[in-house]
Amino acid sequence: MTLHLSPVIRLPRMSVAQDACVTGERMVPEETPVALTYNGSTHAVMMASPSDLEDFALGFSLSEGIVSDPADLGSMEIVEHDLGCEIRMWLSDRCGGSYQMRRRALAGPVGCGLCGVESLAEAARPVRPVTGSLRLRPGAIKAAMADLSEAQCLNRETRAIHGAAFWRPDKGVVAIREDVGRHNALDKLAGALAKAREPGSDGIVLLTSRVSVEMVQKTGRMGASILVAISAPTALAVRVAESCGITLVGIARSNAFEVFTHPDRIDLRTS
């Protein structure tokens, strides 16, 4: 469906510089509550950009392990409300039962301690090892990050939106998704690639943000073996990337970057 909400809004503002004031307008990103529901039950409410919401819903479902294949989502409906958007999803019979069991398992009695333990285990759940054979020269990483910047249409308007892209050496940027939330942008990208049946092992994931452990986990579930980000990773993100086989590249700016795990995929031959 076509939403009436726009991901970018023009607002009045006053610019102050060197004791001078100038009135004008600035494009700013919209931030909208998005409720994700499965089989009639609300699973989460995320603050997100109101764009590419079908990709967001699918990518979130895959990242959270609610479904393992796009076909597991029987149907999807996006409903716009005064306060935000609701994405109503219905799971296939194969996934519906397991989802209800998962919801019951996480809804323990207050104060028993089980809920906290379950949540900690969920946050630290392992990522299936990736085994991609893709290797890149340093110049390819520089080119990929330049392509990422060029492809960020919404961020050029606002300078306030994160981007997540999938880049292939033979095609450049295959897909890019943007959002006010870095996790949301990556979920949207995961959904777009899953719909297109684009193998994650054929390219690399590019991020405009720092790399937390969730970003590594989401990348691993996409099957990508190389993750490149403009900012630094957390220590836990590095440990998880090391354990699941992802080459984690951070602080990728201008002509330099830093490799934190599995450097064998970066080809440093001088000839």
Image (cartoon, helix red, strand yellow):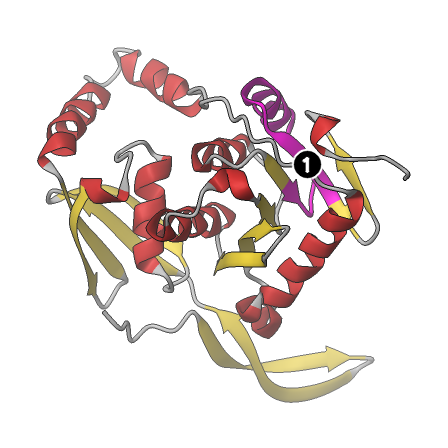
- Residue at position x 63%, y 82% in the image: 14
Say above or below: 161 vs 118: below
Residue pushed farthest front?
Answer: 271
Most foreground residue, 24 or 258: 258
- Residue at position x 23%, y 22% in the image: 106
Where residue 199 appears, x then y in whole percent? 45, 42
Where residue 25 appears, x then y in whole percent? 57, 84
Residue 45 within the segment the image draws in magenta: no
Image side of residue 38 versus residue 262, left or right: left
Most foreground residue, 72 or 77: 72
Most foreground residue, 249 or 215: 249
Q: Magenta residues, as a range?
A: 228-251
- Split into 4 quadrants, where in the image is the N terminus? bottom left
Say above or below: 106 vs 160: above
What's the residue type where badge 1 is placed? Answer: Arg
Where residue 33 appears, x then y in whole percent? 32, 56
Image side of residue 185 versus residue 253, left or right: left
Q: Secondary structure at mark 1?
A: loop
Residue 166 visible, this angle = yes
Residue 233 visible, this angle = no
- Residue at position x 25%, y 11% in the image: 112
Residue at which label 1 appears: 135
> What crowding class fits label 1: few (fewer than 14 Cα within 10 Å), some (14-19), or many (20 or more)?
some
Residue 246 within the segment the image draws in magenta: yes
- Residue at position x 26%, y 15% in the image: 111
Say above or below: 27 vs 221: below
Q: Where on the picture, by quarter, is residue 159?
A: bottom right
Residue pushed farthest right?
Answer: 270
